[in-house]
Amino acid sequence: LGTALVWLPAPELIKLPPGGKLLALREGPMATASVVDDASGARYLEVNGHFRMGGTSSVRSDFRQAMLPLLLHPAPRNALFLGVGTGATVLGAAQMPNLDVQAVELSPEVVALLPWFDHPASRQDRPPIAIADARRFIVADKGRYDVIVADLFHPALDGSGALYTVEHFEAVKRRLATEGVFCQWLPLYQLDAPSLRAIIRSFLAIFPESSAWLNHYSVRTPMLALIGSRAPKPLDPDLLAARFSDGTLRPLIQPLGFDQPIDLLGQYVAGATSLARFAGPGPRNTDDFPFVIFDARSNVHALSAPPWQLLSTVITEAKTDAAQLLDPSQRGPWDQRLDAYWQARNRFIQAGAALTGEPRGTALIAAAAPGLLASIRDSAEFEPAYAPLMSMANALLASDRQAAERLLQAIDEAAPSRRDARDLLSREFVR
């Protein structure tokens, strides 16, 4: 056996995308971390040649990972981030006015490569990052935080399953301030259903009034946030509207797609009752019974499944209900709007999952437009479908004006309460 091991090739710890190249490398006792780019020039951080930790193409999504839990707290003053990846989520949080941000990262090799991902639009320096094990840091720390955000920990990465245990969630809860919010991000494209259900059961054991939210509606890299609080309260849309109109906050959140409260509320998936029903009976993930670690092989196999498979399971089985989200006094004017928005969202996700291949140009418009039109028929407020339709129409104006006119008419018929398509029709096609 020893002789065989000598002749076996060493494992490949650097993986280059097609047409890409290696930009930087750090090897150490914790990991082999590398910065690579692909043929398009997009830059990525990879660990041990297997785990992609983000890149320049996902900055907007990374900023939203920070912003969702920060917006769910009424007035955050400080935030702690467990795991940093490329640093974009931490940097996104640092843009928020009057917020003190700290972070913890296990791998010094990853921290050494963060300058490769400095964002030119950032108005702040990178917050301080402690190189430490997140579990030990949480237990030893004496601080209290308004918001704690745990990054996307790949469940098949050695040791990551311990960051989803009942004991760890309990330790995090002790670090929350009175109205503190904890957000645990989950990579649905890297999980199998048994691990997801076990993690939710474990989270509910410590945060019995939990809720689940989506980061975005991409079917390629779907992410689910479990939100827990020391003192959970129903959301007040009026207070959200006041925050969204704040002159210092609005320029930061509007480019991220948070223009009005429904853009945030639309990301809500399930409350505690729905989550408990989705998770069902079964084991929790604990230090004594580390189910997620036992299930790691299945989570590796999950990488080869369609990335939207588990997302589709979640939105189908976890029924979204405004009664678990809003204060009863606020529900009247919101129930119908939110139900329509959530239906449009689910239809949008299903349409994205149904797209085959990699269509481009007019082929993409022909394949995607029917699903997008169906979404805005459900809710004209569903901007993730309305905005792409208008972009498609504008693109067609330069190449096929008849097709552009037909698409604009279809948009106007699907969402007559909005004037964008009608105004463009009147400007471009004067009768």
Image: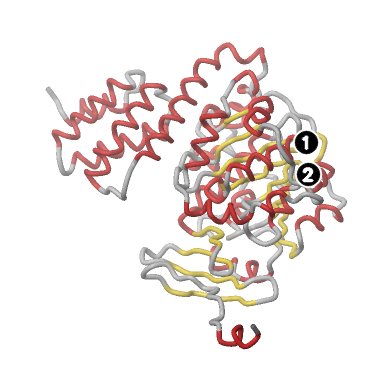
- Residue at 61 percent across and 46 percent down: it is 186
- Asked which quadrant contains residue 211, the reply is top right
Q: Are marks 1 and 2 in contact (CB under 8 Å)?
A: yes
Residue situated in front as seen by the camera: 193 or 307? 193
Rate crowding at label 1 as few (under 14), some (14 to 19) or many (20 or more) other CA atoms within 10 Å: some
Residue wearing tag 2? 166
Q: Residue 146: in sight, yes or no?
A: yes
Vertical comparison of 385 with 9: above or below: above
Which element is circle 2 on?
A: helix
- Towards the viewer: 114 or 16: 16
Which residue of the protein is positioned furthest toward the front in this rendering? 1
Give the amino acid type for the residue marked by disc 1 in the picture: Ala
Q: Residue at x 56, y 76 (%)?
A: 11
Query: Image quarter for residue 185?
Result: top right
| Mark sitting earlier along the chain (1/2) | 2
Tell whether 112 sits left or right of 46.
Answer: right
Q: Position of residue 29 (x, y in %)?
A: 70, 75
| Mark 2, other Cα within 10 Å: few <14 / some 14–19 / many ≥20 | many
Q: How is the image coloured?
A: secondary structure
Q: Amino acid at mark 2?
A: Val
Residue occupying the point 43% across, 35% down? 349
Q: Position of residue 190 (x, y in %)?
A: 55, 51
Q: Where is residue 8 shown, x and y percent of the image?
A: 55, 82
For numbered disc 1, what is the local secondary structure? helix
Across and down, in percent, residue 277 comes to 65, 27
| Residue behind mark 1 | 205
Near-viewer residue (417 or 203): 203
> Who is closer to the viewer here, 378 or 1?
1
Q: Is residue 35 above or below residue 5?
A: above
Seen at 64% across and 23% down, the residue is 325
Left or right: 303, with 95 as reference point:
left
Residue 86 is left or right of residue 347, and the answer is: right
